[in-house]
Image (cartoon, grey):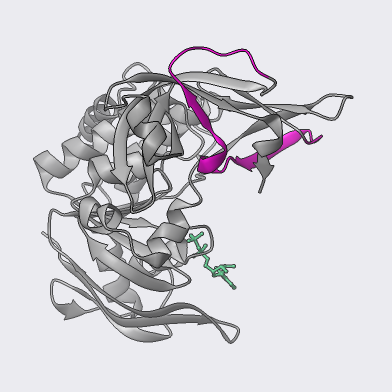
Amino acid sequence: MLTIEVQKLSKTYSGRQVLKDIDFKVQSGEVFVLVGPNGAGKTTLLRILDLLEEPTEGRILFNETPVDYSAKDKVALRRRIGMLFQQTKLFDMSVSDNIAYGLKVRGEDKVTIEGKVRETLKLVQLQGYERKNALTLSGGEAQRVSLAQALVTEPELLLLDEPTANLDPRNISIIEEVLTNINREKRTTIIMATHNMFQAENLAHRVAMINNGKIEGVGTFQEIFGRPSEPVKNFVKFENVFSGLSTAFTEGTSIIDIGDRLKIEAAFKKSGYVMIHIPPEDIILSSQPIVSSARNMFEGRITQILETESAVKLKVKVGESKNFTVQVTKKSFKDLQLSIGTRIFLVFKASSVQII
Ligand code: ADP
């Protein structure tokens, strides 16, 4: 059981403050999700919680005791924490040996290690992978091995930094399932950063909105995103952000494969990995497929409806996991007779696709 309290924490890098006056408390067994744009300070905060870095000001308390950064205490504390980064490096050895590493360092005996590795492989649904070389795995499988590495030592606190970024829907759902299970069964406290709003909504007991190094709000997903404050609204503006491999064509357009068998046509010419944004107000909704000059049309299903004072925002799920936000006027919303579950076509121009 581990409660975490962060008090008046600030972090400065070469004179620049990247975390300012951070205060929050996470209960034992809670799933606490950090959301916020790139550069907000989420990774820095997670690294400080993992005791990889010290705060410039303020302090962290584990079970109401302030962290002692002397080597001996830090090692003992870090053994109670598991951390999974967005990009992890596995060792050039078998999957089993990769997972066993943390247990060997702790001096566990061979039989215990074998049992725990087997159990953890089952948890991440990679039975049969024991002898495979870890470097031959797909991105999603490798991330599940990294998760197994973090879990095999049965941490009381699990820290996750964008653990499913760039993964395919199947691997995302396996990882989400593992996190739900260990939180429920082992009461593991989880603090995670994510860009995936649906993930935040599904997993979080509470969400902290972090922006520009400051916490702008802490509460349930509904409390934070149901009644959005200005900074939250700004973050939501960044919805419809996708990434993928872009192929440029001579006529000045590109096709971006965002995964999930979805390809978006854009009016720019760029090859390679790109991140794109489609403004929600640039997407047209239609109840029928339409023939138009707009180059992109996808069929999806409405999963959320948010009425604001002037307009209606809808979340539309396309394919297995891509979530689009669309903004329509109140009148269109009424005329189209939309409700949760309605199947709808999203149409937008190649020129609405912006590169970020
Ligand atoms: P997020 O994870 O929310 O994208 P980060 O914590 O990675 O944000 O970064 C917050 C800010 O701190 C960024 O402006 C980043 O450039 C800066 N930063 C992070 N680590 C360092 C470092 N070691 N030295 C200097 N600046 C850093």
- Give the quadrant of residue 152: top left
Q: Is residue 71 above or below residue 209?
A: below
Residue 290 in magenta stretch: yes
- Left or right: where 101 falls relative to 234: left
Q: Residue at x 78, y 36 (%)?
A: 268
Q: Residue at x 11, y 41 (%)?
A: 184
Image quadrant occupied by the N terminus: bottom left
Q: Nearer the viewer, residue 112 or 92?
A: 92
Q: Position of residue 206 (x, y in %)?
A: 21, 56
Q: Position of residue 310 (x, y in %)?
A: 38, 51
Q: Residue at x 43, y 85 (%)?
A: 56
Q: Nearer the viewer, residue 49 or 345?
A: 345
- Left or right: where 188 falls relative to 213: left
Q: Position of residue 335 (x, y in %)?
A: 36, 27
Q: Position of residue 100 (x, y in %)?
A: 34, 39
Residue found farthest to the right: 250
Residue 62 in magenta stretch: no
Q: Residue at x 42, y 29 (%)?
A: 95
- Left or right: where 318 falls relative to 352: left
Q: Is residue 125 above or below residue 268?
A: above
Residue 115 appears anywhere in the view: yes
Where's ligand 1: which quadrant? bottom right
Q: Nearer the viewer, residue 325 or 46?
A: 325
Q: Nearer the viewer, residue 132 or 186?
A: 186
Q: Is residue 147 above or below residue 290?
A: below
Residue 46 appears anywhere in the view: no
Labels in figure, total: 0
- Magenta part of the chain: 268-292
- Give the quadrant of residue 279: top right
